[in-house]
Image (cartoon, rainbow, N blue to C red):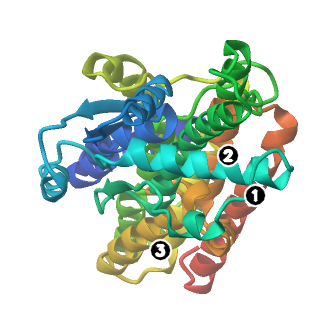
Amino acid sequence: MYKVWISIKKEFYLLFNDKTGLSLMFLMPLILVFIITIIQDSAFKIINENKISLLIVNHDSGSEGNKLKDMLDQTRMFNLIENNNIDFSEVKKEISKENAMVALYIENSFSEKLNSKTIILSKLVMANIGMNDSVNKKELISLLPPTIFFFNDPVLQDNYCYSILNLIHSNLSIIENTKMLEGLYSEMGYDSVPQNIKESIINNKIPIKRIITSVDDNCKIPNSTQHNVPAWTIFAMFFMVVSLGSNIVKEKLSGSFIRLKTMPTNFALILFSKQIVYLFVAIMQVILIFSIGIYIFPLIKLPELTISSNTLGTFIIVIISGIAAVSYALMVGSISKTQEQSNGFGAISIIIFAALGGVWVPIFVMPEYMKQISKLSPLHWCIDGFYTLFLRDGNWLMLYKPILILLVFSLSCQIITYLKLKYDKLI
């Protein structure tokens, strides 16, 4: 036990003298967590809160343009900006000034054309059921439909633009149906549409109840913090490959492993000590970055990190992720011949694993084939474990897969490390 303690003290001494390694493991991920979370927070708010600036230029001489504006306002999906003092050519300039992400231009004849269209359609319906004289269909064909122009900033993704267009079409359909109903009642000799029928047309929407799938009813809404804090913490864990991998190479080149063979100290003790020290570092990384997410983020108007109620599950995922990171760093150090190889290969491989594993971009926005490829990254399974706990309130049945895969990955790295050092006759 005394030998273990002495060996661990030695490893701590070596670690704290590696200023570059410490900054890469602690300072760099902290900066990245702040920068990436702040950048992504607005994007997550647009997706989750559906708030986007919408400029409305309403030149309609009738009342239907105002009805459409009011209906869009009632959806609470937009921050409406109304400016009726600009013409068609100036709308694009307003978008370019970044005053709004999207804009609607309603022409001055919108209500007139809509009324003409609904009157002719009403007459056509009445004629088809034999309650009116026949209608000249050429008149209907030659009728110009009302037009609304939609402008969008090119940075706004197509799928989001289509969502906005579908919402506008939905509200336009309500206006058209109401006008159509008024036209039919007028053709039948009524002065107006009964209020209860008109309200039924306007409010006739099938209710859709949103249910967030989780094991219990306490599921958290995904946000920039819930994604970035665990993701970049895992990235920081695995980036210890620069420090630990370089440490292994340095000891190989200095002949430390050879000298160990002539001493009573067991080689397994040295590797065990290194793993204990760097596993401790991984736990400290989690505590530090998670604390930032819980206590500092709310002070700068960022969402607070919500920790899972499954404390034991969180602890196990942290430990398993740390072991996987340490094992990978040992393997890289054992197969590298120089410190430059270890640092270069280790850093680049972790960046690739991070890109594939969902650290930079969440897995759910990737194409299907990339989702399958991402499963090759150990960081993917670390993030999956945290997502299962933090977002899905997952139970042990849901956690077994990432835990099992990370254990197999860690064991494989440990075996490769041992075989490589054995092959080099260093142990």
Identify which residue is drawn at 57% across, 23% down.
307
Residue 295: percent from left, percent from top: 37, 17
Quadrant (top left, top right, bottom left, bottom right) of the N terminus = top right
How many neighbours does mark 1 have within 10 angstroms: few (below 14), some (14-19), or many (20 or more)? Answer: some
Mark carried by residue 258: 3
In-image side of 208 versus 44 (left or right): right
Residue located beneath label 2 in the image: 122
Q: Name which of mark 1 and mark 3 comes first in the sequence.
A: 3
Q: CA distance from mark 1 to mark 3?
A: 34 Å
The image quadrant of residue 150 is bottom left
Residues marked 1 and 3 touching at CB (< 8 Å): no
Residue 103: percent from left, percent from top: 30, 47
- Amino acid, disc 1: Ile
Q: Name which of mark 2 and mark 1 comes first in the sequence.
A: 2
Towards the viewer: 177 or 321: 177
How many neighbours does mark 3 have within 10 angstroms: few (below 14), some (14-19), or many (20 or more)? Answer: some
- Amino acid, disc 2: Ser
Towards the viewer: 143 or 372: 143
Q: CA distance from mark 2 to mark 3?
A: 96 Å
Towards the viewer: 140 or 296: 140
Residue located beneath label 1 in the image: 405
Residue 206: percent from left, percent from top: 77, 31
Identify which residue is drawn at 37% across, 30% down.
66
Say what secondary structure mark 1 lies in: helix
Looking at this rendering, what residue extends furthest in the front direction?
Answer: 133
> In this orientation, does residue 89 appear?
yes
Towards the viewer: 398 or 132: 132
Identify which residue is drawn at 70% across, 16% down.
194
